[in-house]
Amino acid sequence: MVVKELSAGKLVVRKSKFYAHLYSVESAEDILKIREIHNKKYKKAAHHCYASLYDGVEEQRADGEVGSPGRVLLELLHEYELNNHMIIVSRIFGGIKLGQGSVSRAFRDSGRGVILDYLN
C-alpha cells in the first residue's frame, strides 16, 4: 500500500494548531499506516482524531478530545460523498482551552478546508 495524501492544511484557533489531511484509503491497513505516520509526524499533538469511510465501513476516533471530532469528521465525509477517504486532524494544544463548541468547529473547519481544497 502506498499512502496517497490528497490534501493538507493547517488551522490556528487561539494558539491551538489543527493539522488536517485528506487521504485516499481502501482498507483498515491503510488507516493504521496513516495513523502511524501522523503519530510520528506530529509528536507534540495531544490528539489525532479521524474518520474514514471505505466500502461501506465507517470508522471514527475522537482520541480523548472533547466535542466529538470523529463524528464531526465522519459527517463531512458523508456530506461530500467521499467513500474510500479518510480525514485525520492532529491538534497541538496552544495552552488555551477552547470548549466543546469551539473544538468541534475547529475540527469541522479544518476538515472542510482540506476537502474543498481537494475538490477545487
Image (cartoon, rainbow, N blue to C red):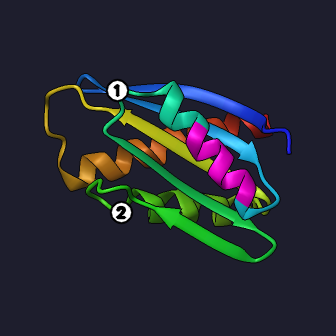
Q: Which residue is mark 1?
A: 44
Q: How far across and how far down the image is residue 80, in percent? A: 71, 58
Which region of the structure is painted magenta? 29-36
Q: Secondary structure at mark 1?
A: loop
**Could you say which disc has been placed on residue 68 in the image?**
2
Quarter of the image with the N terminus is top right
Answer above or below: position of 90 versus 72: above
Q: Quadrant of residue 76?
A: bottom right
Whether 31 is among the magenta residues is yes
Identify the amino acid type marked 1: Lys
Q: Write the residue at 73% across / 57% down.
A: 29
Is 52 displayed left or right of 73 in the figure?
A: right
Q: Nearer the viewer, residue 76 or 19?
A: 19
Q: CA distance from mark 2 to mark 1?
A: 21 Å
Q: Position of residue 47 (x, y in %)?
A: 36, 44
Is residue 88 or residue 38 the one in the foreground?
Answer: 38
Magenta residues, dominant SS class: helix
- Name the image quarter holding the C terminus: top right
Disc on the earlier residue, 2 or 1: 1
Q: Percent from the top left, x then y, of residue 35?
A: 57, 45
